[in-house]
Image (cartoon, helix red, strand yellow):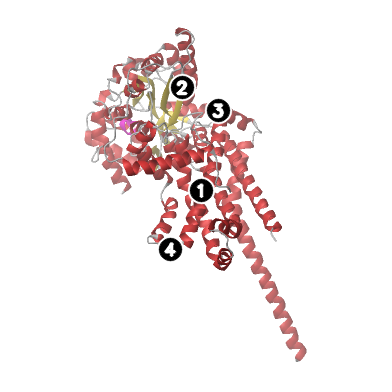
């Protein structure tokens, strides 16, 4: 091997040398280099950095070209370049906080967007956008073996002896919280064999479910993939996941509990980044575009439900979306901050129930 | 009496030869079976899955946005990592073996650290150190160098994760090398560099190649650190292993397997070529 390597090598050596110099010269304080300097001059071809969770990648594969075409038509032939990044929802939120220059984020649940907001990168109330900032919805359901051999109908059926449950780990997967919120909410609303408003009964239900959990996977997708490879006999997951699996030709079967939660997936402009990159107008236009009937239709076709609660509840039996008897939102349970603290805090009800079941 | 003893001896020696042959055979079978079971079989399953329906799945996978770019990026960064770590790995091994200085032992232990920490943690460390929000990352960005969430970050992660390979391949060979030859060269008036080039380098070249090969192969498959550091931008910083993960999580296990098979083929092909080359060179050597 020769010491003269590729250009990347020399670039790395240059950067390492620069590093050494820096370490020697620069003390604790950093210069105010960050942010935009001077007035913002938009680029001829704006570049939008888009960071999303992995599941809706294919939908965005259709949505983004449609937006680019629309923008081009309305702005005298100007092209917009999208830099797309897909990874787990919480990973993306953490990356953005760590400095990933996303102008728009599409995540699986509101607390991940709020984490970016808390880091000071989103300075507006993103829930004031149409549909409360949500672009897609689904519902928590059970993925069972063909013919539902265990006869699972509701959350309390999951606590029966011999039931082996797959659900992602709420400590690792933000999305996993939806499943627990669904069981908790259904119980508090008087379903799953629990009296309405009986918090102790709801906590018992969670303990019973956790006692039957076979594996806590990294993410919702991991759970359903593990289920497909033959593990467990019920996976708690989302309707759109099962529809995707069915479309891929897999024999998954959805069971709809009478009462379940509406999963809402938010999108927000990271305005501090968009301002710094001088793409705030394009970013805002893109998010507005996500709330148009055209895009809503694309999400429906990809297996999601309507962002309108009444429509989501009604479903579309003709297209294979059955109605949900009692569909509730996180807002009905007091909103994410309250639910997050109550269930998933360090001595939250779900955290403790899970620890007990595992210990 | 004598003939009986002879017969016993012959039978004994025969059975001892059979025993030896049996031992040889069972050891060989165990080694081959273990290799087949642990490596060849899983690889065969993946290849079968990827090509059970012909080339259609591979073609579909390559049509996935950013797929071909991801494979090229992985090849380029892996090659660069192999080249750079070949140089610096050899340097570290040389210094650790030939120089005596305080902290040498500690430095030697440090070399193996990347093997001991989860690569995901390596990724998180690099983001903390060079990320856009870190003082170093900010300053580098000021002079136009972006490390994290860029291709440079991928290379950096690969360099860290694969650092031990060349060092650990070269070190034992250097230790075995008789310093007398080097001293002779020096007393004959050769400079330090000439001595290294003419005496040391030919002896350690196969070890460097073997180490660099490990770096390359390991880099092709590196996931944990890269998925954190790269930002996974389709068409720019998306690498082949992350692409495989994305395909698998889009319920396209066949396409994921097809891309994985391509990586297998590249990795295996490189190993074969390199062994052939080093063997040829050895045969040429006087």
| Mark 4 vs 2: CB contact within 8 A | no
Q: Are marks 4 and 2 on the same chain?
A: no
* Disc sitting over residue B85 in the figure: 1
User: B148 above or below A114?
Assistant: below
Q: Nearer the viewer, mark 1 or mark 3?
A: 1
For the residues marked 4 and 3, what is the alpha-carbon distance in whole angstroms? 54 Å
Can residue A308 be seen from the camera position used here?
A: yes
Numbered disc 3: secondary structure: loop
Going from N to C along the chain, the mark reached first, 1 or 3, is 3
Residue at numbered disc 3: B64
Give the distance between the C-alpha atoms of the residues marked 1 and 4, in whole angstroms: 23 Å
**Residue that sits furthest to the bottom in the current view:** B1
Q: Which residues are magenta?
A: A178-182
Q: Is residue B10 left or right of residue A276?
A: right
Return the residue nearer the eye: A344 or B103: B103
Kindly report the secondary structure that dominates the magenta region of the rendered protein: helix
Crowd rating for badge 3 (residues with CA inside 10 Å; few <14, some 14–19, many 20+): some
Q: Label 4: which residue?
A: B100
Q: In the rendered structure, are the residues bearing label 1 and label 3 in contact, judged by CB atoms less than 8 Å apart?
A: no
Residue at mark 4 to residue at mark 2: CA–CA distance: 54 Å
Q: Marks 4 and 3: CB-CB under 8 Å?
A: no
Give the Cα separation between the discs numbered 1 and 2.
34 Å
Residue position marked by numbered label 2 in the rendering: A82
Image quarter for residue A267? top left
Residue B53 is drawn in which quadrant? Answer: top right
What residue is drawn where x is 28% and y is 38%?
A350
Mark in the foreground, 1 or 2? 1
The reply to whether discs 2 and 3 touch (Cβ–Cβ < 8 Å) is no
Specify few, some or many for label 4: CA neighbours under 10 Å numbering under 14, 14-19, or 20 or more: few
Give the Cα separation between the discs numbered 1 and 3. 32 Å
Q: Which residue: 71% across, 57% down?
A: B284
């Amino acid at each position: 091997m020769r010491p003269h390597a590729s250009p990347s090598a020399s670039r790395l050596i240059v950067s390492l040398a620069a590093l050494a110099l820096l370490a020697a010269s620069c003390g604790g304080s950093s210069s105010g280099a960050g942010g935009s300097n001077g007035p913002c001059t938009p680029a001829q071809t704006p570049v939008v950095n888009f960071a999303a969770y992995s599941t809706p990648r294919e939908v965005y594969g259709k949505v983004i070209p449609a937006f680019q075409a629309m923008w081009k038509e309305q702005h005298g032939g100007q092209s917009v370049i999208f830099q797309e990044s897909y990874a787990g929802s919480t990973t993306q939120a953490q990356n953005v906080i760590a400095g990933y220059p996303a102008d728009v984020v599409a995540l699986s649940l509101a607390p991940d967007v709020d984490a970016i907001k808390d880091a000071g990168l989103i300075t507006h109330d993103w829930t004031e956008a149409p549909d409360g900032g949500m672009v897609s919805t689904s519902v928590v359901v059970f993925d069972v073996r063909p013919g539902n051999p265990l006869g699972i109908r509701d959350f309390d059926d999951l606590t029966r002896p011999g039931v082996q449950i797959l659900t992602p780990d709420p400590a690792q997967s933000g999305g996993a919280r939806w499943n627990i919120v669904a069981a908790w909410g259904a119980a508090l609303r008087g379903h799953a064999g629990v009296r309405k408003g009986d918090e102790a009964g709801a906590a018992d239900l969670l303990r019973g479910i956790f006692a039957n959990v076979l594996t806590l996977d990294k993410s919702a997708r991991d759970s359903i993939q593990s289920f497909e490879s033959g593990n467990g006999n019920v996976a708690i997951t989302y309707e759109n996941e099962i529809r995707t699996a069915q479309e891929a030709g897999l024999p998954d079967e959805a069971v709809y509990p009478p009462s379940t939660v509406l999963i809402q997936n938010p999108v927000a402009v990271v305005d501090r980044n968009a301002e710094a990159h001088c793409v705030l107008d394009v970013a805002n236009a893109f998010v507005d575009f996500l709330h148009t009937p055209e895009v809503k239709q694309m999400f429906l076709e990809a297996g999601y439900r309507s962002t309108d609660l009444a429509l989501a509840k009604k479903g579309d039996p003709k297209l294979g979306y059955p109605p949900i008897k009692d569909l509730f939102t996180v807002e009905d349970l007091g909103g994410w901050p309250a639910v997050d603290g109550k269930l998933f805090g360090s001595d939250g009800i779900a955290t403790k129930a899970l620890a007990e079941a595992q210990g | 009496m004598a003939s009986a003893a002879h017969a016993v001896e012959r039978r004994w020696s025969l059975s001892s030869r059979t025993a030896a042959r049996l031992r040889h055979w069972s050891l060989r079978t165990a080694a081959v079976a273990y290799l087949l079971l642990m490596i060849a079989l899983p690889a065969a399953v993946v290849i079968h899955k990827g090509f059970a329906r012909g080339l259609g799945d591979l073609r579909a996978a390559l049509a996935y946005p950013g797929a071909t770019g991801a494979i090229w990026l992985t090849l380029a960064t892996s090659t660069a990592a192999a080249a750079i770590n070949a140089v610096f790995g050899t340097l570290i091994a040389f210094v650790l073996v030939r120089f005596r200085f305080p902290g040498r032992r500690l430095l030697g232990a440090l070399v193996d650290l990347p093997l001991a920490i989860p690569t995901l943690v390596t990724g998180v460390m690099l983001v903390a150190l060079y990320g856009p929000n870190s003082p170093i990352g900010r300053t580098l960005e000021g002079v136009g160098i972006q490390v994290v969430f860029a291709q440079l970050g991928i290379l950096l992660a690969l360099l860290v994760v694969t650092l031990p390979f060349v060092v650990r391949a070269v070190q034992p060979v250097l230790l075995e090398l008789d310093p007398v030859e080097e001293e002779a060269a020096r007393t004959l008036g050769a400079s330090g560099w000439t001595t290294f080039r003419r005496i040391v380098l030919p002896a350690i070249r196969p070890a460097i190649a073997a180490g660099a090969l490990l770096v390359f192969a390991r880099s092709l498959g590196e996931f944990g650190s890269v998925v954190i550091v790269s930002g996974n931008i389709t068409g720019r910083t998306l690498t082949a292993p992350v692409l495989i993960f994305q395909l698998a999580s889009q319920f396209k296990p066949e396409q994921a397997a097809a891309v994985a098979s391509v990586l297998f083929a590249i990795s295996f092909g490189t190993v074969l070529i390199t062994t052939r080359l080093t063997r040829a060179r050895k045969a040429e050597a006087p």
